[in-house]
């Protein structure tokens, strides 16, 4: 969920992610967001873990949020927060309140995680109702398709990015050597691609139909835990390293 001026842009193996692209529902992982506090001081935990934060702050005019991100060849990890300096369009106030509840997830009971998907191949019809948002910051005619029900206060936010905003791995691989965007893809720990994700869900959480459908479609797997978290594996975990960023972030990295 970045502005158009941004960079090009729960355990599932690389094979599973690629298989999901070929099988219904014709979706694959695009990016992950975690709702954090204002100005994302939690970014320090990512940097300490060896991930680079892309330069600049993405302002989502009309939506009332801002974000920073770590970029990878085939996706990105975004830290997003409700920002009072970013304008909110009339009628979008409820969305800001949802982000505030997600930010305060430890006391509100909401989930702080979002999973962004992108369509691949033919457009398919999903077996549940969806709805769209098109805030001011997005290109004209583009919209985000939201899969999580409007009144769901417990589940992650699942959504589909419009093609104009989706990550393009081929374009990222073909960046010129002197392109400043390439530097954002160079992480101190050497990771390049998102290859596995696992959603850790509280024991009391009952998966909603969208959660169950996407998990069955091999877009992620899940396990039970004490509270919400996400495990991300890069490059198939080739270095056999793990960094647990809790409690700063509900995030565990494997690479």
Image: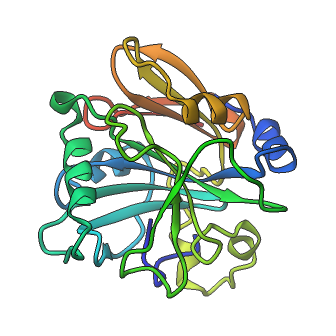
Q: Is residue 102 above or below residue 84?
A: above
> Is residue 254 visible in this depiction of the protein?
no
The spot of residue 129 in percent (x, y) is 56, 48
Q: Quadrant of residue 106?
A: top left
| Residue located 21% across and 75% down the image | 90
Instruction: Compare residues 185 and 83 and report the one nearer the observer.
Output: 83
Is 246 positioned to the left or the right of 187 in the image?
left
Farthest right residue in view? 22
Q: Residue furthest front?
A: 129
Quadrant assignment, res 68: bottom left
**Vertical position of residue 89 compared to residue 95: above or below:** below
Q: Residue at x 53, y 48 (%)?
A: 147
The residue closer to the viewer here, 195 or 215, is 215
Residue found 38% across the figure and 47% down from its top: 150
Q: Nearer the viewer, residue 31 or 254?
A: 31
Q: Quadrant of the C terminus?
A: top right
Residue at image x 65%, y 32%? 213
Residue 34 is situated, as x and y percent measured from the top left of the image, at 36, 47
Where residue 165 appears, as percent x and y from the top left, is 57, 73
Q: Does any portion of residue 150 appear in the rendered image?
A: yes
Question: In the image, 116: left or right of 133?
Answer: right
């Amino acid at each position: 969920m970045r502005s158009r001026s941004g960079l090009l842009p729960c355990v599932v193996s690389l094979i599973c992610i690629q298989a999901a692209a070929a099988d219904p529902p014709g979706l694959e992982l695009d990016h992950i967001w975690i709702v954090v506090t204002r100005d994302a001081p939690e970014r320090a935990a990512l940097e300490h873990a060896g991930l680079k934060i892309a330069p600049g702050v993405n302002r989502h005019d009309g939506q009332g949020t801002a974000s920073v991100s770590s970029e990878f060849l085939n996706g990105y990890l975004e830290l997003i927060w409700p920002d009072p300096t970013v304008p909110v369009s009339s009628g979008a106030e409820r969305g800001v309140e949802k982000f505030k509840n997600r930010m305060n997830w430890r006391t509100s009971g909401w989930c702080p995680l979002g999973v962004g998907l992108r369509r691949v191949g033919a457009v398919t019809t999903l077996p549940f109702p969806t709805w769209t948002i098109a805030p001011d910051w997005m290109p004209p005619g583009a919209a985000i398709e939201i899969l999580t029900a409007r009144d769901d206060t417990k589940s992650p936010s699942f959504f589909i990015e419009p093609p104009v905003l989706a990550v393009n791995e081929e374009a990222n691989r073909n960046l010129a050597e002197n392109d400043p965007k390439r530097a954002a893809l160079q992480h101190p720990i050497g990771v390049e691609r998102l290859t596995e994700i696992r959603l850790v869900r509280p024991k009391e959480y009952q998966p909603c139909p969208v959660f169950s459908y996407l998990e069955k479609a091999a877009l992620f797997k899940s396990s039970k835990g004490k509270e919400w978290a996400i495990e991300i594996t890069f490059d198939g975990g080739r270095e056999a390293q793990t960094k647990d960023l809790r409690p700063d972030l509900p995030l565990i990295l494997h690479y």
